Amino acid sequence: MANETTISITVNGRERSSEVEPRMLLVHWLREGLGLTGTHIGCDTTSCGACTVLLDGTPVKSCTMFAVQADGRALTTVEGLQQNGKLHAIQEGFKEEHGLQCGFCTPGMMLLGAALLEDNPNPSEKDVRWAISGNLCRCTGYQNIVKAVQYAGQKIESERSGAQA
Amino acid sequence: MAVEEKEIEWLGKSVKRKEDDRFVRGAGNYVDDVVLPNMLHMAILRSPFAHARLTSIDTSAAEALDGVVAVVTGALLAEHNLAWMPTLSGDTQAVLATDKVRFQGQEVACVVAENPYIAHDALELIEVEYDPLPVIVDPKKSLDDDAPVIRNDKEGQKDNRIYHWEAGDKEATDRAFEGADVVVSLDTHYPRSHPAPLECCACIADVNPGTGKTTIYMTSQAPHAIRTVFAMVTGLPEQNIQIISPDIGGGFGNKVPVYPGYVVATAASLLIGQPVKWTEDRSGNLASTGFARDFHMHGELALDRDGKMLGLRVGMLSDQGYAYADAQPSKFKAGLFHIVTGSYDMPAAHVVTDGAYTNKAPGGVAYRCSFRVTEASFLIERLVQNAAYEMDMEPAELRRKNFIRPEQFPYTSVTGFIYDSGDYEKALDLALEKSGYNELRAEQKRMRDEGKLLGIGLASFTEVVGAGPSRDYDILGIKMFDSAELRVHPTGKAILKLGVKSQGQGHETTFAQIVASELGIPPDDVTVQEGDTDNTPYGLGTYASRSTPTGGAATAVVARKLREKAKEIAAHTLEVAPEDLEWKGDHFFVKGAPDQSTTIQEVAFAAYTNHPQGMEAGLEGVTYYDPPNMTYPFGTYVVAVEVDAKTGEWKVRTVVAVDDCGIRINPMIVEGQIMGGLTEGFAMSSMQQIAFDEEGNCLGSNFMDYLLPTAWETPHFELHETVTPSPHHPMGCKGVGESATVGSPAAYANAVVDALLHLGVRNIDMPMTSAKVWEAMQQGRQAQDQ
């Protein structure tokens, strides 16, 4: 394909390079280029957030970014949440609190939750509702997503204080 | 061998979901995640006009684009007799337009290309000439004598009427109204909505020229029924069609029908000999696939002076779009809308329904709803609330006075439903108590004195779910039963295969719990499989809250069958007579000698290694369960809202939901379903609407115009339960996936109207936007000033 450009992005800690058309959306590069299909597409208009990934730690909607815009940056997708085979606290929280049903919004919601907890380890219900309000869920009514994020916050806190003791 | 103490009670336990392990890892497998070798990609060109003659299509520039493999038009499909297909209601729908386009967004042509970007590039190169025709968006005008005939393709179709259908007894109802002291009426429109699951529709059609096998990965809630429909439409032998519905990102009724994209992708794969993937975009999903509701309703309720209901008269006009494509039993033209007498002991009722074609997308899917019970429940609960105002009665007390009483069950309603069980007053009382209803009323009065608006809404709904029985319910003639196949392996682990199909409802956990409860094999040892038609028994799929009433029942029945066989095997290995054995949770023991026992796992091993001579080996079975009746979940919801007296903006303060769905298998999952439904009810009442302008332009074909609630607006829910088992379900369960979507919209609407009661407001059509509420307040104030 003519007019391709080379990009290099650190995805889940691993550097990935490829030739892409400048118009290639980041979400397509992740899903089709790298086979990381945990990042979903729900709306095409930056409204639903199923495509949320973390760009240098900040949530972005990957359906509204070109892959070339992420050149040289670091991305975390849902596949990068677990470390050494162990689930991230936010993944555990979603399981424990029934924070998901069909699972389609879940990767984006978990990444938002993880990013929130980095800044605010002990969020109120209102804090969580605000933090996830850029993303849509059609199954749960959000209440258990809030609980899932709070569960993860408590778990991270207790692990930290356990490590310090 | 002595049995250790271990978990044997699995019913009513909030077991964590087995399916979550893959979803939280981003390892779900949705259709768009599937990649096949040599796969091509398809995109759809849609009509910009709502009604126009198609004069020409020039595909030459698109075909010449590098990377384009084929361009498919209606004319090409017509050569193969595939330009039209049947809808689930037995009407016809264009696959790709040939003569006219009949709604904005209609499928006109498809491009198949090496990648989706090229396919979309090529769409831009297709030249289509349209000759615009007059557009009909109002179903009332559509039935005018001089309205242009939208379906002029259909022989004998001289107007835009689809059906006229009545239920109940007109004469008895007329008599009831003649003797009434009070008659209350209400006109309301339940607006057109769209289920909008977060995953759009998608398929991959793989017609293998070598084997003759057609494999279609599809976002389908009903894969078996789809396979049969595909076989009938295409003429392909059914054993060579395999439908695979992998993980589905929400359905809510949107993924029941067959859509043109599925058919064209299959035809394209057949013509080209390579797999073809079609992934719908959101605007295509909202503009063209199964919409919901759009009922224009008129209700009249007759009462005596004491508030006893005497009769109900209902007229309903359904805006169907350009094809009658309701997914519902063929016997009932307006679905189960005629359960409109709701929770009340209604002596007489007459329901008149009409369906009309308009220049809108077809559909009429029951969005998180059992065949149109949602609209019915909304109408009666709004009418009852208004009747209470008219009679100056407390709305809760008017309901209480008219409820079907517990001793009346099974109760036969005047429109032909046999309610299985209920205790409506118990649910009402609990909801009143938990919501602090009397205190809310007192606070409402205090606030009103201060010029602030608090509204309290009630809804005491009854649902009808779980179709069959097959004598009354079918889809395109295929009877509604469901199936379960259970295979217990020699090591005591099991696979359960079902004809229903989860889209997030947690079947892999709930149905494993049923096996655990009936057969003592822990849920972790039971794998549940659904969605692959080659590897599951025939069933009608998941919608209308039918999975637990039908597939769940089938699971319990097949597990019990295996337990009977297991008993014979256990008697053989323990060397006693079967009648000397008793079952406890997960093992058989000899009556009076509990130490002489054998576990289900030991029996399973024996079934393959030491079964009695003369008995068939193995421990497997399949059951097709035809329910004797529908199940009738119910409940009462209390909603309190605060309305800004200046702007009309309203906020939910309290939602207390009491649900009775009989026995709960997994309370955590049940509550998840209820909260989801309460959110949909909030969405319907406050923001969701697919609207059209006069030219038939769809004003809600993306998530910037079609508003869905986020976590910020969505209320906090408080849930409670009563338990009235279904007398005919093997485990006493009723379906629950849709109760809250059905019951809650009226509670929200009643609350907003209640806040404005003193201004004379009696109705605001949904969605009750701030603008509409403000306008209602203004009109009320002006009327009072005069």
Image: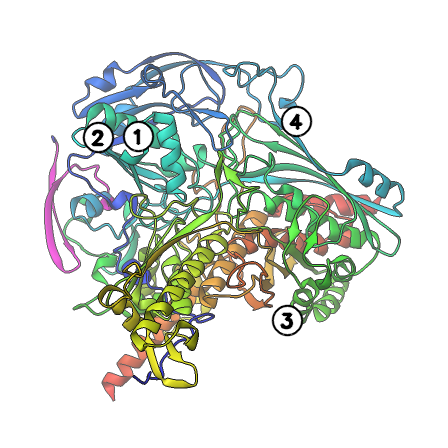
Viewer-proximal residue, B116 or B414?
B414
Tell me where residue B521 appears, x and y as whole percent: 34, 69
Alpha-carbon distance for marks 4 and 3? 44 Å
Using the image, determine if residue A79 lies above or below residue B273: below
Marks 3 and 2 in Cβ contact (< 8 Å)? no
As helix, strand or loop, the secondary structure at mark 1 comes to: loop
In this rendering, the label closer to the viewer, 3 or 2? 2
Marks 1 and 2 in Cβ contact (< 8 Å)? yes
Amino acid carrying mark 3 in the image:
Lys
Q: Where does label 3 land, which residue? A: B434
Amino acid carrying mark 2 in the image:
Gly
Q: Where does label 4 land, which residue? A: B140
Q: Residue at x 31, y 78 (%)?
A: A157
Could you tell me if residue B532 is visible in this image? yes
Amino acid carrying mark 1 in the image:
Pro
Q: Residue at x 41, y 39 (%)?
A: B225
N-terminal of the pair, mark 1 or mark 3, is: 1
Chain letter of the residue beneath label 3 in the structure image: B
Circle 2 packing at 10 Å, graded few (<14), some (14-19), many (20+), is: few
Q: Which range of residues does the magenta coloring cover?
A: A3-27
Q: In which quadrant will I find the N terminus of chain B? A: bottom left
> Mark number for residue B212?
2
Circle 3 packing at 10 Å, graded few (<14), some (14-19), many (20+), is: some
Alpha-carbon distance for marks 2 and 4? 49 Å
Q: Where does label 1 land, which residue? A: B237
Using the image, determine if residue B545 lies above or below residue B16: above
As helix, strand or loop, the secondary structure at mark 4 comes to: helix
